[in-house]
Image: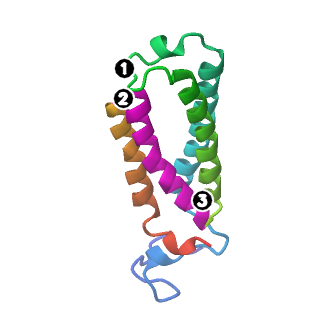
Amino acid sequence: MSNPFVDLASSESGQDPELDFEPDGGRSGCLTVYLVLGMIGNVVGGLVLLTVGVFRESVDTLAYPNEVLPGVGRVALVLLGLLGFVTAFFFKATYDWKRWGLIGTVCLLLLWPVLNAVVIGQTVGAVGMGLGFVILYLLFRKHLHRFE
């Protein structure tokens, strides 16, 4: 039986133990949960936005009364719904350690709050969505060398 009290300051490679990773591309639990929930949330959110945008009548007045750009409600919801699927696709590519997936995820995480504030007029929601970018940075800052 191996000793459970291992000196974490040393590693077999002689490097910082935080830089060591499994050859199969393993990731931390928090990072995995963030990416999986990001995929699920964007697919569900995309379905909700598409459903509301396509099937609800008078979206402009009922769904978003604070809308900054009146008259674009239905089209905006459909486009945001499709963008939710694109975001889930980039989250999946990031999960598979693809550099282009991370770049797309970062770009879309920066774009979502802007769209939320401009199209829908919810600045508080835009700030909350911006926190997703901060969380992504904090989770990935030690793993950027893994992307191919």
Q: Which residue is mark 1?
A: 66
Classify 132 as above or below 118: below
Report the front residue among 129 and 22: 129
Residue 4: image x %, image y %? Answer: 49, 70
Residue at the spot of label 3 = 101
Q: Nearer the viewer, mark 1 or mark 3?
A: 1
Q: Residue at x 42, y 66 (%)?
A: 141
Residue at image x 40%, y 41%? 114
- Three-letter amino acid code of the residue under disc 2: Gln
Cα separation, mark 2 vs mark 1, equals: 7 Å
Q: How far across and down, in percent of the image, does residue 20 sit?
A: 52, 77
Spatial distance from mark 2 to mark 3, Cα to Cα? 27 Å
How crowded pointer 1 is (Cα within 10 Å; few <14, some 14-19, many 20+) is rated as some
Regarding residue 3, the answer to whether it shows in the image is no
Range shown magenta: 99-122
Q: CA distance from mark 1 to mark 3?
A: 33 Å
To which residue does mark 2 refer? 122
Q: Which of disc 1 and disc 2 is earlier in sequence?
A: 1
Q: Earlier in the sequence, mark 1 or mark 3?
A: 1
Residue appearing at x 43%, y 49% in the figure: 110
- Sequence-first tag of 2 and 3: 3
Image coords of residue 88 (percent x, y)? 62, 45
Q: Quadrant of the C terminus?
A: bottom right
